[in-house]
Image: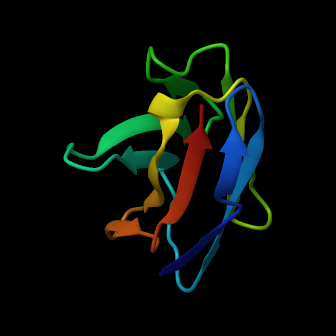
């Protein structure tokens, strides 16, 4: 399974970005797709996840600002990020969990300037 993330970049505080992640390969019974992030000097943390039943979960720090969505037919997951803050600066990783394993994308850098 390969995950290709895109959409990161440099944005001013208060701006928006939309991350995309396309999954390819042999997937079987996808349970969960989501986005994680890792800021410099910090551990990787969950940002938002969405189950196969489209149930979503968000980190408290991004609730009401970020929205995760999924294109089931294309095995893609998206993260709409609004009202971005400098503390959202991090490398964002796409994640997929299926019956066979747990997979990560290569990461896309989001930088929010103040």
Residue 26 shows up from this direction:
yes
x, y percent for residue 70: 72, 48
x, y percent for residue 28: 50, 70
**Quadrant of the snapshot with the C terminus:** top right
Residue at (54% x, 22% y) in the render: 62
Q: Is residue 111 left or right of residue 106?
A: right
The answer to which image quadrant residue 50 occupies is: top right
Residue placed most toward the observer, 21 or 1: 21
x, y percent for residue 27: 52, 74
Residue at (80% x, 63% y) in the render: 73
Q: Is residue 55 left or right of residue 46?
A: right
| Count of all numbered marks drawn on residues in the image | 0
Image height of 106 relative to 29, above or below: below
Residue 48 shows up from this direction:
no
Q: Is residue 31 left or right of residue 103?
A: right
The answer to which image quadrant residue 77 occupies is: bottom right
Residue placed most toward the observer, 34 or 85: 85
Residue at (47% x, 81% y) in the render: 1
């Amino acid at each position: 399974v390969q995950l290709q993330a895109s959409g990161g970049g440099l944005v001013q505080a208060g701006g928006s970005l939309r991350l995309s992640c396309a999954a390819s390969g042999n997937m079987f019974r996808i349970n969960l797709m989501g986005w994680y992030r890792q800021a410099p000097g910090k551990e990787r943390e969950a940002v938002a996840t969405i189950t196969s039943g489209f149930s979503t979960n968000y980190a408290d720090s991004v609730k009401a600002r970020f929205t995760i969505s999924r294109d089931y037919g294309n095995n893609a997951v998206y993260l709409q990020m609004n009202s971005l803050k400098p503390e959202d600066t991090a490398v964002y990783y796409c994640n997929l969990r299926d019956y066979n394993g747990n997979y990560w994308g290569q990461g896309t850098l989001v930088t929010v300037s103040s």
